[in-house]
Amino acid sequence: MKKALKVASVLLVLAMAVTLLAGCGGGDKKPAEQKVEKKVIKVSIGLNDASPEYKGLEKWKELVAKESKGRIEIQIFPSAQLGDDIKTMTALRAGTLEMSGPSSSPMATIDKRWMVFDLPFLFPNEKVVDAVLDGPFGKKMLDSLSAHGLVGLMYMENGYRQVTNSKREIKTPDDIKGLKIRTMENPVHLAAWRKLGANPTPMPFSEVFNAMQQKTIDGQENPNTTNFLQKFYEVQKYTTLSKHVYTPFVIMYSKKLWDTLPKEDQALLMKTGKEASKWQREYNRKVDAEAAQGLAKAGMTVTTLTPEQQKLFMDATKDIAAQFEKEIGKDVIDEVKAEIAKASK
Ligand code: TK8
């Protein structure tokens, strides 16, 4: 018994010595050169790598790499490789993915207040958009995500949405009658397209191109940048610059994973994120105008509405806000409208 103990303690001392020696491996390295742990953050988006959203994230990735001296790496996964908007939000809430940049519209599946951004013809121009998103209202909406296991970091621009289809030129709501239009998975969009006389079908973004190619739908609506850069002109003939709604992208982080980050890293991500968000919106606005020309060059009929024609679309959808007042919350609608009025002065 005694002997066994002795053997055991000798072995223990030996083991400790070996561990210590191993720890000295590469002992001539200066501490500064010792390996810093690299942090990889994955972000998923539904659009492809030509999209302004991707470019904005790429800008952010550069800023983060620079500020963190290469310690933090953002990896961008485009084209819904990691799942569409709704699926990736679920992954964030479960803590199996760090970040995603969905449209605000499918976020209504988490919190109906987000439908406020889906109200037709809400934002008169981009100057007002910036004031509202970067002001107290935009911040409050981002902050409200923490109750749902998400950290709202910033907005990027998707932009004003325009309707495309393969059947006929759209100049008035009458031209929409009976068209099968894909919408985002959001009740306000469904209701608005019903009001316009369409036959709306909600589906995730990654299925839209095939559905148009196979003609299970006649059309869809997205900003010029998406219609051009996702090559929708290959399967659509007409685009009308309807600007019927402005929807943003919300760049969000899994709260479960965010809470494990050191405070300095959280601050670094927030600070560089703000810069990237500003850069992305400017970039998007430049590309949007080019994209409209690109659509025409690619053979689409691009229709600009007269103010009278656009008013017909506004009139047809003017009751939507009242219809969704309960679900969105009267306070939320009143607040955004007050902010818009203030910024419009
Ligand atoms: C991409 C979507 C897309 C949106 C849509 O994941 O679904 O039509 O406009 O940008 O978020």
Image (cartoon, grey):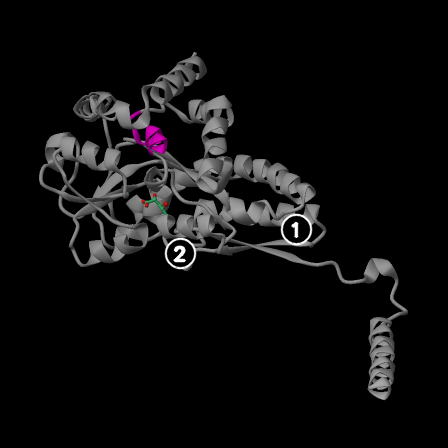
Q: Quadrant holding ligand 1?
A: top left
Residue 231 in the figure: left or right of residue 308 = right
Q: Name which of mark 2 and mark 1 comes first in the sequence.
A: 1
Outermost residue on the right side: it is: 28
Q: Which residue is mark 2?
A: 79
21 shown above or below 259 = below
Where is residue 307? Give x, y as percent.
24, 21
User: Which residue range is magenta in the image?
Assistant: 112-121
The answer to whether residue 303 shows anywhere in this view is: no
Badge 1, how many Cα within 10 Å: few under 14, some, many 20+?
some
Q: Amino acid at mark 1?
A: Ala
153 shown above or below 335 = below
* Residue 337 image-quadrant placement: top left
Q: Which residue is mark 1?
A: 65
**Camera-nearest residue between 253 and 294:** 253
Predominant secondary structure, magenta span? helix
Quarter of the image containing the N terminus?
A: bottom right
